[in-house]
Image (tube, rainbow, N blue to C red):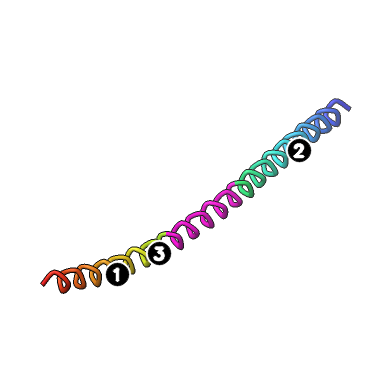
Amino acid sequence: MSAKADYKEIIQEYKDEVRILKDEVSELQNNCKEKDSALKRTKQKYENTLEDLDKSNEEADKLKEELKVLKGTSTKILT
């Protein structure tokens, strides 16, 4: 009977270990999901920033062109 009790104890220990491991896996999966969500948000912010930068560069280029035109006009008026 002693051997049977030992086996039951060993089986219970394995069950406990399996439960602990399942909890750890679940926690790791949740952490991965949270990180994925954070990465998606960061990527979206990055894309929005790039879009804003492109718009700003286009506006700056337009203003440079307008400035060139205005400089050309002012030199014609003075001469």
Tag 3's secondary structure?
helix
Residue 68: percent from the left, percent from the top? 23, 69
Front label number (2 vs 3): 3
Q: Which residue lies furthest to the front in this view?
A: 78
User: Are there few (<14), some (14-19), or many (20+) residues within 10 Å of tag 2?
Assistant: few
- The amino acid pointed to by label 1 is Glu
Classify residue 2 as left or right of residue 75: right
- In three-dimensional space, the C-alpha distance between marks 3 and 1, rounded to whole angstroms, equals 18 Å
First in sequence, mark 2 or 3: give its number. Answer: 2
Per the image, the residue denoted by label 1 is 66
Q: Is residue 47 found inside the magenta-colored segment of the image?
A: yes
Name the residue: 26% across, 66% down.
Answer: 67
In depth, the one of 75 and 16 nearer the eye is 75
Q: Which amino acid does label 3 sit on?
A: Asp
Q: Single out the mark in the foreground, 2 or 1.
A: 1
Cα distance, mark 2 to mark 3?
Answer: 52 Å
Q: Please state, as top left, top right, bottom left or bottom right, where the C terminus lies in the image.
A: bottom left
Q: Disc 2 marks which residue? A: 19
- Residue at 51%, 54% (x, y): give it: 45
- Whether residue 13 sits left or right of residue 75 in the image: it is right
Residue at the spot 83% in from the left edge and 29% down from the top edge:
3
Highlighted magenta segment, given as a residue range:
35-52
Q: Do the residues labelled 2 and 1 touch (CB within 8 Å)?
A: no
Where is residue 64? Give x, y as percent: 28, 66
Judging depth in this view, the residue of 64 and 43 nearest the camera is 64
Q: Name the residue under label 3.
A: 54
